[in-house]
């Protein structure tokens, strides 16, 4: 059985992938529908943590 994926989990994953691939905050906000920079920054933390854990 494949694990279920929530809408929030998928949005978080896409935000991290866009960040890792060099998308600007404005680009990520437009693609993901964020209304404020604070929303985009919330998802940035996840991408940054992933990078630290991987040692990149």
Image (tube, helix red, strand yellow):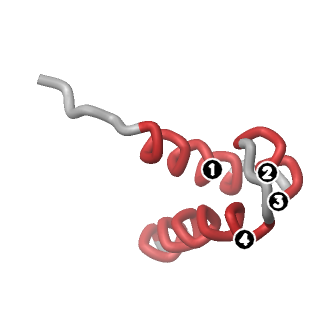
Image spot of residue 16 (x, y percent) = 59, 53
Other residues around mark 3 within 10 Å, as few (<14) / some (14–19) / many (≥20)? some
Quadrant including the N terminus: top left
Quadrant including the C terminus: bottom right
- Residue indicated by mark 4: 38
**Disc 3 element:** helix
- Residue indicated by mark 2: 29
Q: Earlier in the sequence, mark 4 or mark 1?
A: 1
**Of circles 2 and 1, which is in front?**
2
Image spot of residue 27 (x, y percent) = 85, 47
Q: Earlier in the sequence, mark 2 or mark 4?
A: 2
Other residues around mark 2 within 10 Å, as few (<14) / some (14–19) / many (≥20)? some
Q: Earlier in the sequence, mark 4 or mark 3?
A: 3
Please tell me which residue is depicted at 59% across the width and 42% down the height of the picture: 14
**Disc 1 element:** helix
Task: Write down the quadrant of residue 37 in the picture.
Answer: bottom right
- Looking at this view, name the residue that lies furthest to the left: 1
- Residue indicated by mark 1: 15
Q: Which mark is residue 25?
A: 3
């Amino acid at each position: 059985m494949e694990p279920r994926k929530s809408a929030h989990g998928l949005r978080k994953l896409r935000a991290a992938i866009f960040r890792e691939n060099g998308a600007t905050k404005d680009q990520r906000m437009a693609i993901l529908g964020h209304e404020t920079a604070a929303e985009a920054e919330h998802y940035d933390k996840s991408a940054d943590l992933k990078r630290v854990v991987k040692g990149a």
